Amino acid sequence: MSAPIVNPGSFRDPGSRVFERDGRIFRAIWQRSAADYEAVRDSGLLQELVDRGMLVATREVDPAEVNIAPEPVYVLEHERLPFLSYPYEWPFALLQRAALFHLDLQLTALDRGFTLSDATAYNIQFLATRPVFIDHLSFRPYVESEVWTGHRQFCMQFLNPLILWSKKGISPAPWYRGSLEGISPEDLAQLLDWKDNLSWTILTHVTGQAALQRRAIKADASIAPGKQPKLSKIAFKGILEGLRSYIAKLKNPIKPTVWGDYADHNSYAEGDAQIKRDFIVKMASAVKPDQMFDIGCNSGDYSVAALEGGAKSVVGFDFDYGALDSAVARADAHGLPFLPVWLDAANPSPSQGWAQAERMGFGRRASAQALVALAFVHHIAIGRNVPLDMTVDWLISLAPTGIIEFPPKTDPMVQRLLSNREDIFPDYSEDHFIAAVTRRAKIVESRSVTEGGRLLLWYQRH
């Protein structure tokens, strides 16, 4: 049995740590947090949340089984999640869903006499499009009249990004990725106009909170012992329910994008699309991957084909938020094991946070048994000036087998990319594409699509 490996993102709780050992996920709980864990466990709340699918499944194991030092009071084994995603990768629909889920979880806990010690979005993950909470040690007994300690964090990591997105049409992902704590009220307040402040929620939780923070900093104010503000449970629940009502009504101001309607508006006949679907079904049926990546998933047509062929789950990646929200709606409507998330393939999410290890980069989280990348290569090789061989190398590194599509320069969609720029891509050709693939993998099968000459290659990595 291998030695346990500490999860570098779990250090902030002094009473517990998360470990991985032989592919299994454990949480060690030391004396400092044991009493709170016992209280919430013995109340039945944890099991209730697991049964409702709100909390990742877990079981207690003998501490001697995992041999963690110093020896903890308890060790929990958690269900291993197939893919970890972060808030700056969620489309609007999933970020909104995560915010509502956090509020529902807090309200449920309050009804049982407990509260959450924080409000970090990183404690939420997705199983397909269903949110699930992963930190059992965030629950602690509620103290009568205490203030909501996670209020500012909730605003920075949920409310403010959603307001920026909904009211200003600006994705918070670049901001959020640059500042892992989220968007402060002081920063957001400067972007809002007087009409935005007609909202009581914005006036209270953004503009008002920003003013209080600036005043406290200016005055170097501190609260004397015994002078802390008090908040009744009824008022606390009122705040949570008010935020829930407001967030549920926010809309994503989807704007027309160049590629967001690609699945419905392209130059290819339905017969060509059926050739692609059949080829993906064939590959998925042969491989039967537990997890497959769909790079450039758009609204999920070929993710669905892979699931029909035998893939157990699919994580779809796309740069277009409109397409991703459509994919989320599709997954919801049909109950598909399909998670659509945002990816800039030319600039994937890096490892960052404390010691550049707290939040793992895309490459460290990418683990799939198969891959499809259709209508993708030209966007990177021509749209982002990444050499074709490097584009192919990156794709093949993500999964041991899969299907990659190559559209030649005569393809209408490639012509669209080249229409307003000089053609500086002499190596962008089918021969170079095949050579790049065969350097890393063998070709299992190929298929031609359309008279324009698109080529599908099913590869098997060496």
Image: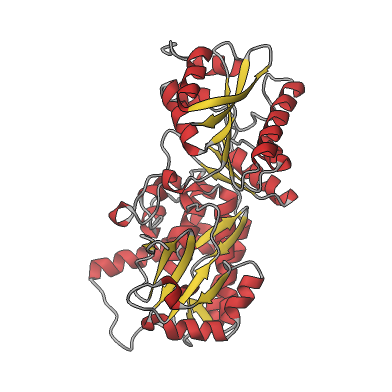
Viewport quadrant of the N terminus: bottom left
* Furthest residue toward front: 1
Looking at the picture, does residue 70 appear above or below residue 413?
below
Residue located at (58% from left, 63% from top)? 132
At x 55%, y 74%, the residue is: 59
Q: Nearer the viewer, residue 304 or 192?
A: 304
Image position, residue 385 (x, y; %): 41, 22
Identify the residue at horizontal 62%, vertical 52% (top origin).
Answer: 128
* Residue 331 screen position, x and y as percent: 68, 48
Q: Is residue 362 visible?
A: yes
In the displayed structure image, the side of residue 325 where residue 221 appears, left or right: left
Q: Is residue 315 left or right of residue 278?
A: left
Residue 224 falls in image quadrant: bottom left
Query: Residue at point 48% right, 78% down?
Result: 62
Rendered position, 300 above or below 50: above
Percent position (x, y) of residue 179?
Answer: 36, 52
Q: Is residue 359 left or right of residue 92?
A: left
For the rendered model, the colour scheme is secondary structure
Q: Note whether 267 is above or below 219 in the view shown.
A: above
**Outermost residue toward the right?**
271
In percent of width and height, residue 461 lies at 51, 32
